[in-house]
Every structure is written in C-alpha cells, then in structure tokens.
Amino acid sequence: MRSVLVTGGAGFIGSNFVRHLVSTTDVSVTVLDKMTYAASRESIADLPADRCRLVVGDIVDSELVDELVGSHDAVVHFAAESHNDNSLDDPSPFVQTNLVGTFTLLEAVRKHDVRFHHISTDEVYGDLELDDPTRFTEATAYEPSSPYSSTKAGSDLLVRAWVRSFGVRATISNCSNNYGPYQHVEKFIPRQITQLIDGLRPRLYGDGLNVRDWIHVEDHSSAVLTILTTGQIGQTYLIGADGEKNNLDVVTTLLGIFGRDADDFDHVTDRPGHDRRYAIDSSKLRTELGWTPQFGDFETGLADTVQWYRDHESWWRPAKAATESKYAAQGQ
Ligand code: NAD
Ligand code: TDX
C-alpha cells in the first residue's frame, strides 16, 4: 500500500489519522475534503507536501471521486456530517453526505477494485439503559435514534451490501466518542473547555447523567490503521477503550482542572431523543488483531486536551462565537 485517499481528512478524526499515517508509515496521503464548517486547513497544514496533499471536493461528485479512487491503493472514509444537534436542525446534508457520498465512494471502489475502510460510530446501535450490564458488540442489532445515526447506519448497510453483492474489499469500524486535539468547538468536550477558558460556565444537557464511552483520538487512529492493514475483508470491528463516564463527571473533572467549584455549570435544554448510554465491547479487535489502546487514563488525556486548547486558541477561536449563538437560539 503506497497511497491512501482519506475522505474528511481536514476534520477532527480524519486529520488526526492523517498525522498518524504520516508519522508511522511511509504511504503518501491524499485528503479529499469539502471544507465544510467542520474542516480546517490548519489541522494538516504543517505536514510535508510530498506526504500529504489536499483536494477540496465533495464525495458526492462521482467524476472527481472516480478519478481519485482510481489512482490510490486504498480509501479510508471519514467524511461525514457528524453532529447530532445539527442533524436535528437540518437533516438534509446528512442524507447527502453520509448516504449518497458513501454510495458514490462504493461505486468507485467497486469499479477500480480498491481496498475500502469505512469509519462509523457506536450510535448505529441506539442506546443502552444506565443499569444494563451489556455492551455493544459486532452482533448487536442496529437501532439508530437520530437523523445523524440513522444515516451512518444506512451507510454501514450499503458497505455490507457492496461487499456481499459485488465483492468489494471493505472493512467497517464502529467507534465510541472521541476526544483530543483538533475537535470542533460544537462538540461536548471542546465546548466545555473553551467555555472555561473564557471564564464562562459549562452547559450540560438535561440531567447530565447520559453516559459516553470516551476514547482518545490517537487510539482510534491506531485501531483504524490496524484494521486497514490486518483486518479481514467483510468484517466489522468495534473500537473502544473502556472509557464510560457520565457527562456530569466529565464536567466536574474539567471544573477541577480549571480550579473552579464543582457546581459551577448550567443545566440547559435537553437534546430531543437524547441517547442515554453507549458502551463498546472491543474484544474482537483486541483478540483477533492484537490492538490495545495506549491512552488508558482519561483524566490525563483530558488534562492534555485542555492544554492543547489553551495553546491553540487561534485554531478554535474563529468558530466559537457562531457556534454559541446557534446553541443559544436553541436554549442550549
Ligand atoms: P468532523 O465533522 O470533525 O469532520 C468531518 C469532515 O468531513 C470535515 O472535514 C468535513 O469538511 C468533511 N466533509 C463533510 N461533508 C463532506 C463531503 N460531502 N465531501 C467531502 N468532505 C466532507 O467529524 P469527525 O468527528 O472527525 O468524524 C469523522 C468520522 O468519524 C465520521 O464518519 C463520524 O461519523 C465518525 N465517528 C466520529 C466519532 C466522534 O466521536 N467524533 C465517533 C465515532 C465515529
Ligand atoms: O453542550 C453540550 N452539552 C452536553 O451535555 C453538548 C454539545 C453535548 N452534551 C452532551 C450530549 C451527549 O450526551 O454530551 C454528550 C456528547 O455530545 P456530543 O459531543 O454532541 O457527542 P455525541 O452526540 O455523543 O456524538 C459523538 O460521538 C459519536 C460524535 O459527535 C459523533 O460523530 C459520533 O458518532
């Protein structure tokens, strides 16, 4: 494998994955990214030009996709509309990018017989009760709740059908909630960190007891590279790092890092249809492919992430005011 096309490589997880590829392999990377509000050129700008090239374009553009896919050895597909709250406001780009975009890529990898890895989410499985002892596995039935998660679920099913019907050489991974550098300020952890940097109060949806299973983005990257290089074609792998925390605990930890009182936050309007709990059992990936997460300690990872946002204010500041005014209009 000498060249990899990374869709969505100027977004949060995609840009971290591109950095991981450039630093741990000698492949050359082409990023295909539409440069939506969620993208940033700066996230990959410092990478060497002979290792990473950015093509600004849309994954629903079949001519462009066909040309790019045909000239690469593998495609890793991160591009998506990724934010649940936005999908409740306007689902239309979610259907276009997540469903039609994935279809467009699948047709191109089918035509050119190119290895394809599809990035997906644990949200396709719906949610669990707080006291449910089970966790999601590769065998859990799909039961997505939001326009975002239903379009991701649909995209996974397209990949499975293209593997079975057309012999496309694809794998799928469903990962839990990521945190780390280069995450947009609309998402939970960067939103609260940047509120605190600005001396404002974190904003907790509903009772704050919803549980997310946090994984550092660098662990997600190493898992994806493991699957891309050693995964079995046609298989799905769940990626998780045993990081279940409720949102209130995360906010309390952040308040502690900033030396603020533990009750110095606001409860705001809950997200409609808000999933209660996600939890990943990643035994298959660990046992069959030998992957293990390296960022085991969430508190340390969170403190490092706070420091990254302190050190990179010029990266996130331009998006903060517009993001907050959108939330304010929704009572959040
Ligand atoms: P993000 O919103 O930060 O980045 C998405 C990127 O895709 C952006 O750079 C954007 O410009 C690009 N993009 C959007 N529409 C496009 C289009 N039509 N054509 C080309 N590029 C387009 O998202 P993220 O959080 O980095 O998520 C990346 C992937 O990982 C998504 O597929 C998401 O479903 C999945 N995922 C995310 C998480 C998480 O915690 N963030 C967890 C599991 C899975
Ligand atoms: O201000 C907030 N306050 C709050 O309490 C925000 C933005 C969120 N929340 C809650 C909602 C969720 O319970 O925090 C939790 C995390 O919210 P998000 O960061 O929006 O993530 P989530 O909806 O869990 O989805 C994320 O993980 C799975 C990613 O955005 C998806 O792309 C991924 O598939």
Image (cartoon, rainbow, N blue to C red):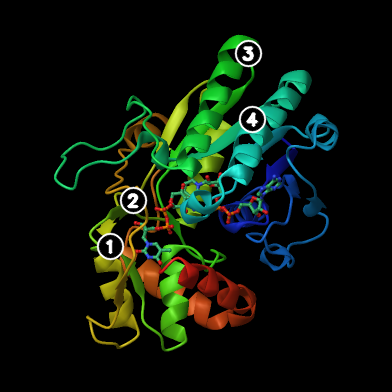
Q: Is residue 78 visible?
A: no
Find out whether the residues at labels 2 and 4 contact each other: C-beta distance under 8 Å.
Answer: no
Numbered circle sitting on residue 116: 4
- Which amino acid is tagged 2? His
The relative height of residue 45 versus residue 53 in the rendered view (above or below) is below
The relative height of residue 95 versus residue 323 in the rendered view (above or below) is above
Residue at numbered disc 3: 167
x and y percent of residue 309 in the render? 51, 77
Q: Quadrant of the N terminus?
A: top right
Using the numbered discs, state the Cα–Cα distance from disc 4 to disc 3 in whole angstroms.
11 Å
Residue at numbered disc 2: 274
Tell me the element at label 1. loop
x and y percent of residue 133 in the render? 15, 39
Foreground label between 3 and 2: 2
In the image, what residue occupies the spot 71% across and 47% down?
A: 26
- Disc with the residue nearer the chain's start (1 vs 4): 4
- Which amino acid is tagged 1? Gly
In the image, what residue occupies the spot 73% across and 62% down?
A: 47
> Looking at mark 1, is its residue's CB closer than 8 Å to ligand 2?
yes
Which residue is nearer to you in this view: 24 or 156? Answer: 156
- Which amino acid is tagged 3? Gly
Residue at numbered disc 1: 206
Tell me the element at label 3. loop
Q: Classify residue 5 as left or right of residue 126.
A: right
- Which amino acid is tagged 4? Phe
- Disc with the residue nearer the chain's start (2 vs 4): 4
